[in-house]
């Protein structure tokens, strides 16, 4: 599954949860997409654009510092970076 697909799954789950919390019900038809892969309802499409932009703007620092000559540290750093990127985050430093 691509990062964008994972982000969409997260977005739709969050949208459904919040809608259910506010209204006590949720109709999955709200998340219908057209042939261009955009949501048919303009408000949902706008929320999706905002969700994507918020994740693109979010940058995190790798929690494992670079330590020259320590293969375990290099491995941990690489695993952490792959995991963070898989979640759609940008890793700096």
Image: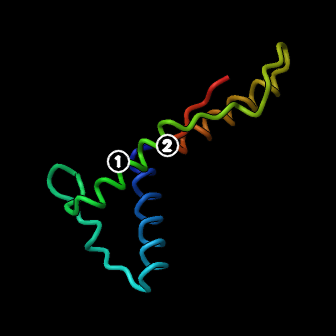
56 w.r.t. 45: above or below:
above
Please indicate whether residue 72 sits to the left or right of residue 27 in the image.
Answer: right
Where is residue 71 shown, x and y percent of the image?
81, 22
Category of crowding for the residue at label 1, using alpha-carbon neighbours closer than 10 angstroms: few (below 14), some (14–19), many (at least 20): few
Q: Nearer the viewer, residue 71 or 45?
A: 45
User: Which of the pair 87/16 is nearer the observer?
Assistant: 16
Q: Is residue 76 above or below residue 3?
A: above
Badge 2 crowding class, 10 Å Cα cut-off, few under 14, some 14 to 19, many 20 or more, is some
Q: Using the image, determine if residue 57 lies above or below residue 29.
A: above
User: Tag on residue 55?
Assistant: 2
Label 1 vs label 2: CA separation?
Answer: 10 Å
Residue that mark 1 sits on: 49
Q: Position of residue 19 (x, y in %)?
A: 42, 74
Left or right, 9 with respect to 80, comes to left
**Which of the 4 quarters of the picture holds residue 43?**
bottom left
In the foreground, 59 or 71:
59
Q: Secondary structure at mark 2?
A: helix
For the point 81% across and 26% down, which residue is it? 73
- Residue at 60% x, 35% y is 82
Q: Position of residue 62 (x, y in %)?
A: 70, 31
Percent coordinates x, y for residue 75 in the rendering: 74, 28
């Amino acid at each position: 599954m691509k990062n964008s697909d994972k982000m969409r799954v997260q977005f739709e789950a969050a949208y459904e949860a919040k809608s259910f919390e506010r209204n006590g019900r949720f109709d999955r038809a709200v998340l219908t997409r057209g042939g261009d892969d955009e949501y048919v309802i303009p408000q949902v499409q706008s929320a999706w654009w905002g969700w994507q932009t918020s994740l693109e703007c979010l940058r995190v620092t790798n929690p494992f510092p670079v330590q020259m000559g320590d293969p375990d540290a290099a491995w941990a750093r690489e695993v952490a970076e792959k995991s963070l990127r898989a979640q759609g985050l940008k890793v700096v430093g």
